[in-house]
Each structure stands twice: as C-alpha cells, then as structure tokens.
Image (tube, grey):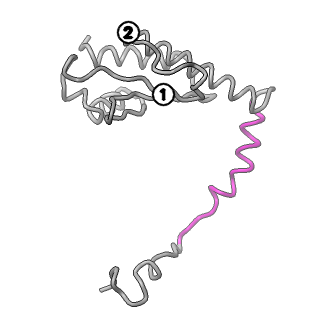
Amino acid sequence: MISHGYPGGFQAEFDWVGTLDPTPWLTIPESLRFMGGLLPGGWAELMARNHALALEGRGLLLQSLGIEAPCPEALIGSMASVPLPPAAQTAPAARLDCKGLHDWFRERGVETWLHEQPLRLLRISAQLYNEIGQYRRLCRLLTEALHGS
C-alpha cells in the first residue's frame, strides 16, 4: 500500500498529473486582450463600469436591508459585501443559514456568494455581462427570503 510512509514518498508517486491541460494558462494573454477590447476605453472603461455597477448594486442591497454602508465607496472595486441580519430576527431559519439561503437563491436562478463567519455576508460582483436589473431582482428575492413576503 502506498501511503505517506512509502520509501519513495507518496507525493513523489502522485505529484505529476498526466492529464494536466495547460490550455487555461495559455489563454490568459488572449483573454486579457479580448476583455480590454470590448469597450472603446479599454480596461480603464471596463473597470470603471464594473465599479459603478458594483456600487449601484450595493446601494440597492443596503437600501433594501435598511443598513448603512459598512465601508466607504473608495474601498469597493467590482465586488461588494453587505452584512445580513441575524437569522433569529427574520423568517424561516432553515432558509437563512448561508447554505440554505444559497440553495434558495440558486433554485430561483440567482448565483451569489454568502459567508457565515464571523458575520453573515452576501457578496455581489459586477462584470460587463451584468445589468442593474439583476441586482434589483436579488434585492426582491432577499426581501422575500428574509421577511417571507
């Protein structure tokens, strides 16, 4: 049996992956060129657009939750996190642990990031293919999940 105590070493026996495909790494330069060419202003315009959309989406979430911004806008790039209220103060607890809430969103066609410790956080990100209507929908669903309405 090959294990950590094997004389040649477990890692030495299994370190090389014979099916390693370098294609993702080889596509990086072309991907960067492509993304930079999507808007007339290049990467600067793309990053500014994503930043503005992340701020607008975060603003909608903050408003729907009735909370203040947890950090200044200058600290936001193209992703933003907002704290969620404790589960005990809201609707069905099974839905409101992060896994339950994530699954609940996914069943409704929404993919988002949630984190449980030390705070319950919901994170959004913005990219060229996103639009503000998606964040509005997220806010409606979040209100439904948190308040059962």
Q: Which range is magenta?
A: 19-38
Disc 1 marks a residue whose amino acid type is: Ile
Residue 50, horizontal then vertical, whole percent: 63, 25
Q: Quadrant of the C terminus?
A: top left
Crowd band around label 1 with a 10 angstrom C-alpha radius: few (<14), some (14–19), many (20+): many
Answer left or right for 8 relative to 97: right
Q: CA distance from mark 1 to mark 2?
A: 17 Å
In percent of the image, x 34 and y 80: which residue is there?
4
Mark 1 residue element:
strand
| Residue 117 spot, x, y in % from top left | 32, 36
Q: Which residue is mark 1?
A: 124
> Toward which corner of the image does residue 87 lie, by quadrant?
top left
Q: Which residue is mark 2?
A: 66
Work out whether 85 lies above or below 14: above
Residue positioned most to the right: 40
Residue 61 falls in image quadrant: top left
Left or right for 112, reference 17: left
Please state the horizontal and vertical placement of residue 108, each as a whole percent of the image: 36, 26
Secondary structure state at the residue bearing disc 2: loop
Q: Residue at x 32, y 34 (%)?
A: 118
Q: In x, y percent, where is residue 103?
A: 31, 34
- Of helix, strand and loop, which mostly describes the magenta segment? helix
